[in-house]
Image (cartoon, grey):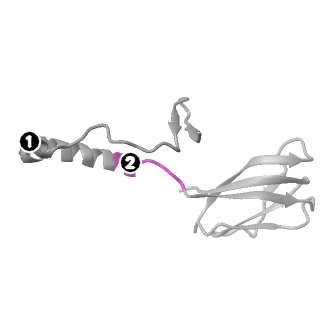
Amino acid sequence: MSANFNKAGAVQKLDVQVEPSETIDDLDVADPVVLSRTLTRIMKDIATLKQVWAPRRIDFEDVVFDDSGTVPHRFRHGLGGRVRWFVVDWTGSGATTAAALARHSDTDANTLVLVSLAEGVGTLRVEASG
């Protein structure tokens, strides 16, 4: 099962087919008042969904860092702007992964460039920051 845990602790299942919470039959469509209310409710739900922040993201898995800060590692993401990046998995030397990687000055809108200050293998998540 795949799931997403939000800040409030609610679980959203990611691998379950969604079913409508209500159905609309011929009698509902024939009644202008019911049809109008139904369409208004649907339009409100669509507007709410459009406002949900869902950044595009890319995971670079099993990246080997073995140069201790001497070689820039380039991650071509093509997101066209500033990105957030963070380590989602790490094995190797170094007390913390936060201190293991540093942004290099060659970073641009489409490529994140990092140097590693520790040896290890990690998965790096890069996402659009808005």
Q: Residue drawn 52% across and 43% down? A: 14
> Which residue is pictured at 51% across the width and 37% down the height?
12
Residue 61 picture quarter: bottom right
Q: Answer whether residue 87 is magenta in the image.
A: no
Which residue carries the number 2 mark?
49
Q: Estimate the x, y position of residue 67 in percent, counting from the top left.
A: 92, 62
Q: Amino acid at mark 1?
A: Val
Rendered view: 41 above or below 124: above
Q: Is residue 98 visible?
A: no
For disc 1, the neighbor class at 10 Å (few under 14, some 14 to 19, many from 20) is: few
Q: Residue furthest top?
A: 9
What residue did someone put label 1 on? 33
Say whether marks 2 and 1 touch (CB < 8 Å).
no
Quadrant in which the N terminus is drawn: top right
> Is residue 75 something one can see in this rendering?
yes
- Residue 49 colored magenta? yes
The answer to whether residue 14 is above or below residue 66 is above
CA gap between label 2 and label 1 equals 25 Å
Which three-letter amino acid code belongs to the residue tagged 2? Leu
Counting the numbered discs, the total is 2
- Residue stretch rendered in magenta on the structure: 47-55
Q: Nearer the viewer, mark 2 or mark 1?
A: 1
The location of residue 99, given as percent across then percent down, is: 83, 47
Does dot 1 land on a helix, a strand or a loop?
helix
Q: Is residue 119 left or right of residue 83?
A: right
Secondary structure state at the residue bearing disc 2? helix
x then y, percent, for residue 49: 38, 48
**Category of crowding for the residue at label 2, using alpha-carbon neighbours closer than 10 angstroms: few (below 14), some (14–19), many (at least 20):** few
Earlier-in-chain disc, 2 versus 1:
1
